[in-house]
Image: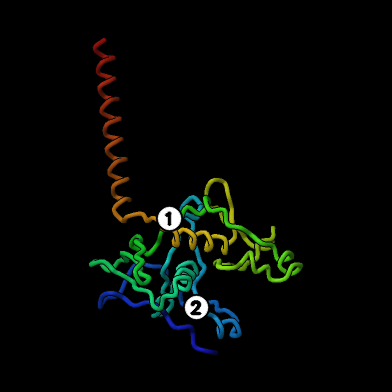
Amino acid sequence: DSPPPPGRFSVAAATSVVDMPRFGGLLRSLPRFEAVAAGAGIANSFPDDDGVVRQMPLVFQVGETLYPSLALEAVRIRRGAGALLLQPTARRHIAAVGIDDLEIPTDGAGRVWAPLARFDIPRTPAYAVLANGALPQAFTDKVVFVGVSASGVAPEVPIGDGKRAPSHHLQAAATAALLIGAAGYRPDYILFAEAAAATLACIVFLGFAVAGRRNLALA
């Protein structure tokens, strides 16, 4: 077997990062594709608890090597950049990913929130390419993702707004969001803020309920 493709990440501190998706191995491309590829990225995504994919991880660890997502790697190649810079926090979580002068803030696990359902990614069916040649006018100066999307052939995942999409569509939408700066992130403190807000709301509700019962008793 040939060695795995090299990682492209530099870490902006002499520390390891503790919170990111980890895998023991890679399902790799065919050697003939790897030999001419400008890069390589991981296409995995993970749904939220309700089964909808809203967050896209940008960084993965395979063994001891860090790899970018397919969307992040597409942005790197589009910008003509070399390495990717991983910026950790003092607590060894991820703060941002850098591509030259572009800084992409992430949550502590290296994920971004991308409005996947809002991007209307153009699709060109294979039969149109085969019937009309390469259709250069359709692909010129574009980032093109090639994948299988026929019904019943490729699994589709929910992406919000009642829509479903195959994996390569998610990566295309995430790439578009990263290129135009539309990808946000969920700060790590939000979970605690939401829990505190919910607790406060319950206390206020109980306070009103107790006051209402007292008023009824007095009446």
Residue drawn at 49 percent across, 73 percent down: 41
Residue drawn at 27 percent across, 44 percent down: 196
Tell whether 194 sits left or right of 60: left
The residue lying furthest to the bottom in this view is: 1
Q: Position of residue 67 (x, y in %)?
A: 43, 75
- Residue type marked 2: Gly
The residue wearing badge 1 is: 182
The quadrant the C terminus occupies is top left
Q: What element carries label 2?
A: loop
> Which one is in front, 183 or 13?
183
The residue wearing badge 2 is: 39
Residue drawn at 32 percent across, 55 percent down: 187
Give the number of callouts: 2
> Which one is in front, 35 or 2?
35
For the residues labelled 2 and 1, say whether their Cβ atoms are less than 8 Å apart.
no
Where residue 18 sits, quadrant-wise, is bottom left
Q: Distance between the residues labelled 2 and 1?
A: 23 Å
The residue lying furthest to the front in this view is: 137
Residue drawn at 57 percent across, 60 percent down: 169
- Residue type marked 1: Ala
Q: Where is residue 9 in the image (x, y as percent from the top left)?
A: 37, 77
183 versus 1 height, above or below: above
